[in-house]
Amino acid sequence: MINIKSFADGEEKSLRNSFSLMKTCYNEMRQECRGILECKAQKMQNINQDSSKKTGDIGMTKAVFFDIDDTIYDYIGAHNNTMPVMKEWAYENLGIAKEDLEKYVAEARVKADDRAGRDYAVNHNRLVRFQCMLETLGKPVFPYAYEMYNLYWDTLIDQIIPSPEIEELMKELKQRGIYIGIGSNMTSDVQYRKILKLGLGKYIDGIVTSEEAGEEKPHRKLFDLCVEKAGVMVEESIFIGDSIAHDVTGAQNIGMPVILYRPKENVNEIEWLQTEKGKCPVIAHFSQFFEAEKML
């Protein structure tokens, strides 16, 4: 005779075991699926971050700082065009031989720097240089020092034009909401005049000169002040300049991404500069900026 109670108890126990097994399998599958989903989510996050870095997303670069001389315009060319005017004036008004003027100015610069020490407003002030030169040569300081100063900068600034593609780059940066700053070793007054003549002031959000910073590039104080004014992190900014000693070294010393600008005709590929601090992309045209940005 079948024991109904024993049979029922056995069935109940079997069902319980089956249910327990199913619950265990379900939990294991659920945990495994969760792990797979989390892994995929992490991979997607990594891909998105990598993609953001490689496409020059404006979330990565929030500020771009430019040097002025030989970066946003051709200083050497303008200076070379100005010196014949200066030599002619100095010969006619002071009797200084044309072939000697540049030597006298260079000697006066050394004397002015020795007097001023670390006063960077004086170190870049041509009025003080011309004054020292005239004093050394026994020539009248008044009115000639001031006349030479005005003649030099008026002649030079009158002829300068923006570097090719610089305005297009600044316009694009502005449209992307990126802060545009200036970091320059020079007196503020002269650099303001240059920017206004170039017509680039409408794009520029801030400027730092060595006169304001009290130090000149490559000292970190000038770069730190640029970043402070922009309100960004160092790694969110890029510095562009033509000098390895001043711009590249200074930026790399504080961990700021930097691009070296060396204009060349018929050069379409970005080159690399290897320094003690790492690599630095070298561009020949400002249209290469966003491509170089991806390499930083």
Image (cartoon, rainbow, N blue to C red):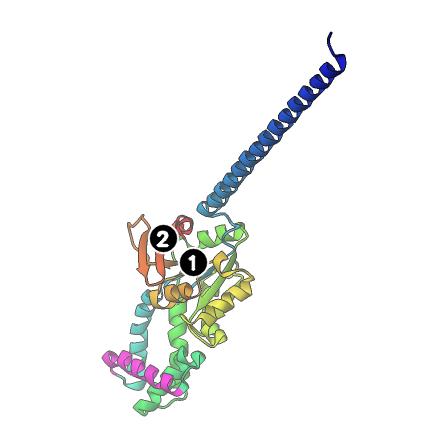
Instruction: Judge whether residue 176 can be spotted in this image.
Output: yes
Residue 96 drawn at (x, y percent): 27, 84
**Toward which corner of the image does residue 111 lie, by quadrant?**
bottom left
The answer to whether 217 appears left or right of 225 in the picture is: left
The dot on residue 257 is: 1
Give residue 198's position: percent from left, percent from top: 45, 62
As shown in the figure, which amino acid type bears the numbered disc 2?
Answer: His
Taking depth in this image into account, of 212 and 39 the one nearest to the observer is 39
**Range shown magenta:** 97-115
Distance of label 2 from label 1 (alpha carbons): 18 Å
> Horizontally, is 15 left or right of 234 in the view?
right
Among all residues in the image, which is located at the extreme front?
Answer: 1
**Residue 195 located left or right of residue 148:** right
What amino acid type is highlighted by mark number 1? Answer: Pro
Where, by quadrant of the figure, is residue 100 drawn?
bottom left
Q: Residue at x 47, y 64 (%)?
A: 182
User: In the image shown, does 254 or 189 lie closer to the viewer?
Assistant: 254
Q: Would residue 23 be counted in the magenta stretch? A: no
Along the viewing direction, whichever of 165 and 115 lies nearer the viewer = 115
Question: Secondary structure beneath disc 2?
Answer: loop
**Disc 2: which residue:** 285
Horizontal and vertical percent for residue 119?
A: 44, 82
Q: Examine the rendering and report whether any part of residue 139 can be seen.
A: no
